[in-house]
Amino acid sequence: MTMSGDDRFEREMRSVIREAGSSGASPELRERVAATLTVRPVQPAPSGVGWPLVAAAGVAIVLAAVVLRPQPISTALPPAASTASDQVGVGSAVAATAATEIPGPMQHPGEVQTGQLLTATDGVVINTAGSILTTHDGGATWFDVTPSAHYGASTEHDVERVFFLDPQHGWFATYDVGSPDGLMIWRTYDGGTGWTGQPMPGLRAVNWQLGFVTPTVGWLATDPGGESPKPELRMTTNSGDTWTDPIDLIAATGRSTLEQIAFLDGQHGVMTGDNLLLFTSDAGRTWSPAYVGATDYNVVEGTPRYGAVHVISAQKAFVVVDWLDPQGRTRGQTILETFDGGGVWASRYSDARHRFWDFIDESHWVAVDDEWVASTTDGASWGASTWTGLPAGLSSAVLQFADPMHGWAEVAGGTACPGGSGDGTGLCAGAAVVPMLFKTIDGGSTWSPVGDCDPASSNGFACPSPMPS
């Protein structure tokens, strides 16, 4: 006997109701129930209609909602990431939000104390007034994105360091000795239009390092300093909403002070310092000495000081080794490279000079030697050095290149020579010793100052014309 379409539909309906599930529902049932819900208003039951049919209709509506409801997308944590159970406590207090009252664009950011270049056109700086400013056109215009709801005339917080992963995702930390909140971590997802502040109750930290490898995975290293140092490391997998229980870095590394730390991904990290090169492959829980291959002792020798880690990818990074003489002066340098996340390092280049470096990728490197700059496209051969316009006699320089042409240089020491003027010795009579931020758009052949555009400033720089990006 052939069953009609309506009879088959009713039979499947009864089966669904009886089983109280949706796994047996046919596509036709799903479509007809959906159509019923979307085009038919619910009508009062006419007199004489039995209660079983009314109940069946109600169950059908509930099941249809279950069948047709969008399912949540599951997001997996990074490998071996900490679960929510060990990310409670510190950082779990209610976060504060602050909308940024962004004024119109400014031509200059004022006197800049530090900066971070993100792309050829995007960058962020902190000026000496403690304001955070961003640019999206290579420095022609700037926007103040400091959280205005938190920073006011009645409350003073020093913004010393800011970390942006990209033009949208940024973080910075503040610490007020008199505040019960302790360290405060602020983050933005929209380039500074809005900020969320996460208090870290009870965490007293004068020294800290904060970094992220993805918009969600990051790390926080802290140390209260003073006579009772307590360097600790925390990780997060949810942008800083919660943090893991602190890792005691004294117990894990044997070092009593906070050293330089960098992570290549959520698991692999490197710690560097004087005669110190350690690595971790378990998010900082344990640290071991890294293996270093031949370092060309025939070219340079001395006591090694391992500098900041230049991360290229989750597996690759560079470290510059300064070889120090007994007086602490650099006699030469070696460039080390890792291909396995920091466990093994090999020598790529050595020279009996002292230069400041940046590594754009595996082959494109830039080095500054006082006011001279040189670059390589293969990590081996070098072009002729050119005079840059940077201050002469630099004591330090941090280079940040977004690509082979666009870079920033945060320099300190030396004497500034505006416009390349001088007495032929590379020094400028009467010029002040200044820390400054410079930018280049031609691979380092020429540089111009970023910010500090007051002609009366002790730095002696007038405002440069906006440069093309």
Image (cartoon, rainbow, N blue to C red):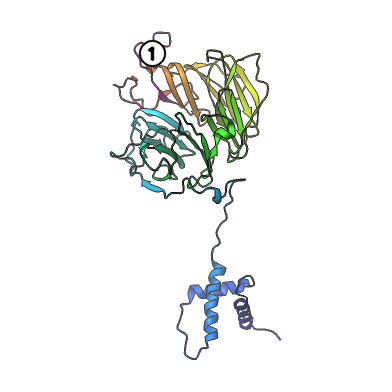
Residue at 60% over, 15% down = 302
Q: Could you say which is closer to the camera, residue 231 or residue 352?
A: 231
Residue at 30% over, 25% down = 454
Residue 108 left/right relative to 91: left
The type of residue carrying mark 1 is: Ser
Residue 309 left/right relative to 440: right
Which element type, helix, strand or loop, lies under badge 1? Answer: loop
Residue at 46% over, 49% down = 92
Identify the image quadrant of residue 195: top left
Residue 176 left/right relative to 85: left
User: Residue 212 location in percent, x, y?
Assistant: 51, 39
Please indicate, yes or no, whether residue 468 appears anywhere in the rendered image.
no
Please indicate, yes or no, whether residue 211 appears anywhere in the rendered image.
yes
User: Residue 2 location in percent, x, y?
Assistant: 69, 84
Residue at 51% over, 49% down = 88
User: Residue 6 location in percent, x, y?
Assistant: 61, 82
The C terminus lies in quadrant? top left
Looking at the image, is 146 positioned above or below residue 276? below
Asked if the magenta segment contains residue 432, the reply would be yes
Q: Which residues are magenta?
A: 421-437
Q: Which residue is mark 1?
A: 421
Q: Is disc 1 surrounded by few (<14), some (14 to 19) or many (20+) residues within 10 Å?
A: few
Q: Could you say which is closer to the camera, residue 23 or residue 3?
A: 23
Q: Could you say which is closer to the camera, residue 156 or residue 44?
A: 156
The N terminus lies in quadrant? bottom right
In this view, the residue farthest toward the right is: 1
User: Residue 202 location in percent, x, y?
Assistant: 43, 42
